[in-house]
């Protein structure tokens, strides 16, 4: 694995906003070996500093531990120095990518476009497991135990996962370990991502078995009303199912959350799905109607 070099990275956040980073861990890999590790706590950026109990319950970091520490606006520099020109590897690395993007956006920082590689995707490709959390994958690969949700330990564990799967697949470079899938001829965005398209019941995505059970969308029964501005409805359904939610096409007595794309818009008239939700709520059902902004905040929770 002489060509296997990268930086593994992991963030912890204070709340559901991706810009609320409160810890970072990194592990530098050179020629198939971890040669350096670092981690530190940070004060979340102004406007994102509230610590949610569910987040504290996951990583154990409290407001008092980060009080007086530097925040992203300063700490992005040592992060860049450690990363250098490396690709960034993480378990569900889309979360790390989003933290970097949103924290940069929140404080006006410009950072390079990193090459991100995901060990969760890799594990799903090469292993048959009931769940694919980082701790489940580490156990399945007989790797050293670690303290899950400690940013430094998670980063090192992600590096070990990548290296072990590289060893098992005889991959010596990142490109061999994560080959780019060939383009599908004659295909672009799936047709069911078109605005206004409604999937058949049989085609709706199923809740991800490895979703975070502490997430605000986990176990919810969700229906969408209208077309979101941020993404096609089918993409939103896929994203919510990945968080452990059940997707529905109509407002039934099982539905707990209705995402109303037109909520708050001038002159908007409640749809039949929204009106039915209001009726069920008035009758005592535990059901809530939320707008797109609130939905995106819930979706941002790791």
Image: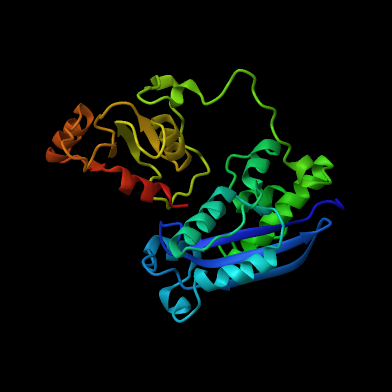
Tell me how many marks there are.
0
The image shows residue 289, relative to residue 108, as above or below, that is above
The image shows residue 266, relative to residue 98, as above or below, that is above
Looking at the image, can residue 92 be seen?
no
Looking at the image, can residue 255 be seen?
yes
Colouring chosen for the image of the structure: rainbow
Report x, y in % for residue 90. Answer: 63, 53
Please state if 52 lies on the left or on the right of 6 as rendered.
Answer: left
Answer with the quarter of the image where residue 49 lies.
bottom left
Report x, y in % for residue 28. Answer: 73, 63
Hey, which residue is sitting farthest right in the picture? Answer: 2
User: Is residue 208 or residue 267 the one in the foreground?
Assistant: 267
User: Is residue 201 or residue 81 the one in the foreground?
Assistant: 81
User: Is residue 297 or residue 203 the one in the foreground?
Assistant: 297
Report x, y in % for residue 33. Answer: 81, 60
Residue drawn at point x = 47 percent, y = 78 percent: 65
Residue drawn at point x = 47 percent, y = 52 percent: 302
Please state if 202 lies on the left or on the right of 28 as rendered.
Answer: left
Report x, y in % for residue 125. Answer: 67, 36
């Amino acid at each position: 694995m002489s060509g296997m070099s990268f930086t593994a990275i992991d963030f912890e956040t204070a709340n559901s906003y991706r810009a609320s980073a409160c810890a970072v861990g990194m592990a530098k890999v050179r020629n198939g070996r971890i040669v350096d590790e670092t981690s530190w706590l940070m004060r979340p950026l102004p406007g994102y500093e509230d610590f949610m109990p569910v987040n504290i319950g996951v990583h154990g970091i409290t407001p008092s531990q980060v009080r007086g520490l530097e925040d992203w606006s300063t700490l992005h520099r040592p992060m860049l120095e450690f990363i250098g020109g490396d690709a960034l590897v993480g378990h569900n690395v889309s979360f790390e990518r989003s933290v970097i993007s949103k924290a940069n956006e929140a404080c006006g920082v410009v950072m390079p476009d990193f090459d991100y590689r995901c060990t969760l995707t890799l594990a799903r490709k090469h292993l048959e497991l009931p769940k694919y959390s980082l701790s489940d994958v580490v156990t399945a690969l007989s790797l050293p135990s670690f303290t899950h949700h400690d940013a430094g330990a998670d980063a090192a564990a992600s590096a070990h996962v990548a290296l072990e799967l590289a060893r098992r697949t005889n991959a010596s470079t990142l490109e061999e370990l994560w080959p780019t899938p060939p383009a599908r001829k004659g295909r672009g965005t799936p047709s069911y991502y078109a605005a206004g398209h409604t999937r058949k019941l049989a085609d709706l995505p199923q809740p991800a078995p490895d979703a975070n059970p502490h997430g605000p969308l986990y176990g919810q029964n969700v229906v969408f009303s209208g077309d979101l501005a941020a993404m096609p409805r089918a993409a939103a359904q896929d994203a919510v199912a990945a968080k452990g939610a059940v997707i529905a096409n109509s407002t039934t007595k099982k539905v707990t959350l209705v995402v109303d794309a037109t909520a708050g818009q001038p002159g908007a008239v409640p749809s039949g799905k929204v009106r039915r939700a209001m009726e069920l709520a008035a009758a005592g059902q535990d059901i809530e109607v939320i707008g797109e902004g609130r939905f995106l905040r819930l979706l941002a929770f790791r």
